[in-house]
Amino acid sequence: MLGLILSNGIYTYFIAKQVEVVNEDKIFVLYGQLISFLESVTLNSMYLMANGTYTLDFEKEILNELALNVNIEDDIMNEKDTWIGCKRISRIFEDEYLETYNLNGVLLYKKLTLSDYVQDFKNIISISIEKRAKKSDWTRELNYMVNNGIILVANQLKIDYDEIDKCSNEWTADFNFTKAMLILSQLSVLVLYFSLVTYKAYKITYSTNLVWKKISESTFNAFYDIRNRCINRLTTYLETSEEEANLLYEHNRCQKNTFSVKFLQIWPYTWRILIFVLTSAAYFLSIFLVSSMEMEKIITEYNSLKDHIYHKNMLILETNFWTISSITGKVDENLVKLYFQQTLNLYSSADSEIMKTKYKKFYKESFDYLIDQYSESIKYGLISTNKLAVLDSYHIFSTKDTDYLDRYSILMNDLKKLNEALITEVTRNGKDVVNEEFEYSIIGFVLYGLFSFFMFLGVYYVFFERKIAHLVKMKELTGMFVLSSRDQIKKGSEKTASNN
């Protein structure tokens, strides 16, 4: 019984480890933050190249992004011990795997590590800000950011991001396998436990029946001696006539009883154990098929929603970028057309995912922002405003209307802030939902422990104490028959000796 409680504790520990990974999923957040940082800086730099007067201070936005992400590469590297075991993403911690363009737009032969690339990118940002302050040409620096921060390296980092998501799912699958093996072992222990108890009940019953068999045999063997003693006592001490006493001679000897083990003799033991075994089996199966599966479902949905919202954030930045690039003339026109259409198609379809009903539990209060006002420029919620942003992007791309760029930049910036607010809210609420589900597992573990102790102290201990007391008495009774048999043997020996 203690072994089952211990195994249940191990099972709960595995679930706790899974919840811990969810609560410490920094790599997922950090990577989404890194991609957004690279794209946001590149976008704001492109706006600085565009003609016009803007409400937003794009240089200040760049400096803010730098300040917020000053240690982003180090923070990602700090997750090495947790995630290096996943071969899918082990490269990001130590390998030189990123292909990059140099300032002249030439693809470099030597690949860079993630840390080296982020540091180089930050240096290029600092150089571009210095050149702009000196009114020097910083087109090469902008091209570097576009070629890497939006196109080449950004796409490689998105692959990494998807691999992180797959790693998380594979890690969950490994835990599922381990927990499934643990459940099978628990059920096997229950079957073994029931089998052992049934065997012990059989042995106890067999021993008890053996005593009764011994009593029957002793009675059978001592029948004539007992009959003669009774006749002698009746006639000698009780003044019974010989005629009446001799009537005992008419009684025949009884047959020996076999006392074979029967099911009804074992049943009082087994039904008590069966209650515990069946309840335990139902509990183990319920926490695996219901609680654990629900936990896996919640974690999968939580990771999926985060993935959709982070991709949404990237699409907001990329849609904004390719729209403004169509006006600045700093990027090849054919490239702009290609990426603009692809990005806008993805941007238009992204809302259908984040609006699914199954994700609502992760939004809580912030779900209203999807349909209600968030700011002056987002009066009808994220979903409706996204549709307006798509129309605005098409308008600017088609007409090259620079007069509308200021309003457009404010709108897209507010959409980005709202989406980031949703990311923060979903991350916090998602962890709360997962932890709340985990609390049910803890409650189940405690209740199962209390149930086990109640069954042991309130049912088994009382029953088996009574049975033990009964067996002690049977042992004493057996001792009496053993002594009686010895006396008979002794008397028989003495009689034989005297005859000799």
Image: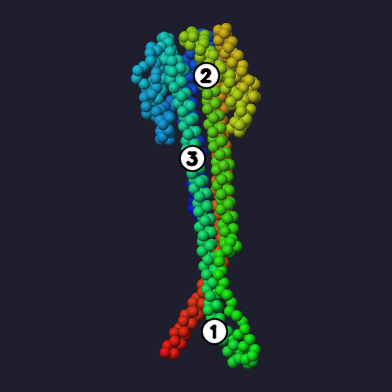
Residue picked out by circle 1: 225
Residue picked out by circle 3: 177
The percent position of residue 180, horizontal first and vertical second, equals 50, 42
Quarter of the view holding residue 108: top left
The numbered disc on residue 462 is: none
Give the residue type that dot 1 points to: Asp
The numbered disc on residue 317 is: 2
Give the residue type that dot 2 points to: Leu
Q: Are marks 2 and 3 in contact (CB under 8 Å)?
A: no
- For the point 59% across and 16% down, the residue is 389
The percent position of residue 138, horizontal first and vertical second, equals 42, 11
Relative to 64, say whether 467 is above or below. below
Q: CA distance from mark 3 to mark 1?
A: 72 Å
SS under mark 3: helix
Q: Is residue 85 left or right of residue 252?
A: left
Question: Residue 26, can we see it?
Answer: no
- For the point 57% across and 59% down, the residue is 270
Q: Residue lying farthest left?
A: 110
Mark 2 crowdedness (10 Å alpha carbons): few <14, some 14-19, many ≥20: many
The percent position of residue 379, horizontal first and vertical second, equals 64, 20
Q: Which label's residue is closer to the chain start, 2 or 3?
A: 3
Q: Are marks 1 and 2 in contact (CB under 8 Å)?
A: no
Relative to 467, say whether 374 is above or below. above
Q: CA distance from mark 1 to mark 2?
A: 110 Å
Most foreground residue, 473 or 159: 473
The percent position of residue 487, horizontal first and vertical second, equals 48, 82
